[in-house]
Amino acid sequence: MRDIVGHMVDVTEGYLKDFDIARSGGQAEPALGLRVMAKRLDERAQAFRSVPQSELLRRLRDDFERVMAIFEGLSADEWTGLQVPHAYMGPLPAFIYPVFQLMDYGVHGWDIREGLGLPNGLPGDVADFLAPFMFILWQVTTDTERVGSEPIQVGFRVSGRNGGTWRVTVNASGYAYEPCPPDELNAPTVFEFDPGSLVLTAFGRVRAGTAYGDQQVADRYRSLFFSI
């Protein structure tokens, strides 16, 4: 739990710095890429181990209030038009940062409860909101070297308020996805997920989902992704 709090302080203060750069027209450092993100975030979180608990929690609360004030103050034009540099992904539209914050608190809240052995699950509002973004997460964490010479085609049926059906194709060039009508979901393998299981699976917390059709294709798909 200590390192999760350190991680949240680190990433939130990173977001604050990113918005300062975007608003001031400053120059950000070159993006580091997602493949190094997990290792670096672990190291940065552990660097807070010497900070007293009360001080670190107070710092996290202050950081949260500051970043939420920035999010709430974004204009309609800034929501999509303001490009904010991300340390690992490069410039991103401002609206993705509130999404990142929901991912941080939603998934890491699950991590804490799971670590403590408490009754656990993602709240419905969190899971429903994040579910469609999991295809973007998979898109940016695909290791194309694992695809092989034969493309992978799968479909998804996701329940929940933001659920739907999606068609996914992965080849040596990358990961592509698109929504499609349920009756046009033609693929060798179709996965079914509830939104909470989809989010936790995409973040590598669980191995969930029901695969119908070709199980070898299902296994190939499941093995494509690196951790962040």
Image: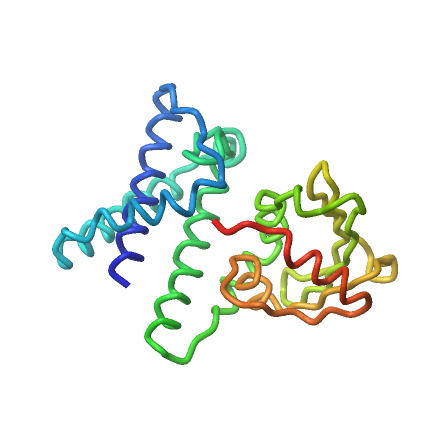
Q: Residue at x 51, y 31 (%)?
A: 77
Compared to residue 13, the image places residue 51 above or below, namely below
Q: How is the image coloured?
A: rainbow
Asked if residue 200 lies left or right of residue 210, the reply is left
- Total numbered labels placed on residues in the image: 0
Asked if residue 123 lies left or right of residue 197, the reply is left
Where does residue 112 sit, x and y in percent of width and height? Answer: 35, 67
Give the image quarter of residue 70: top left
Q: Residue at x 71, y 57 (%)?
A: 220
Q: Quadrant of the N terminus?
A: bottom left
Residue nearest the observer in this picture, 63 or 30 = 30
Residue nearest the observer in this picture, 146 or 225 = 146
Compared to residue 81, the image places residue 4 above or below, namely below
Q: Which residue is drawn at 45% across and 29% down?
A: 31
Q: Which residue is drawn at 65% across and 59% down?
A: 222
Where does residue 169 sit, x and y in percent of width and height? Answer: 76, 47
Give the image quarter of residue 54: bottom left
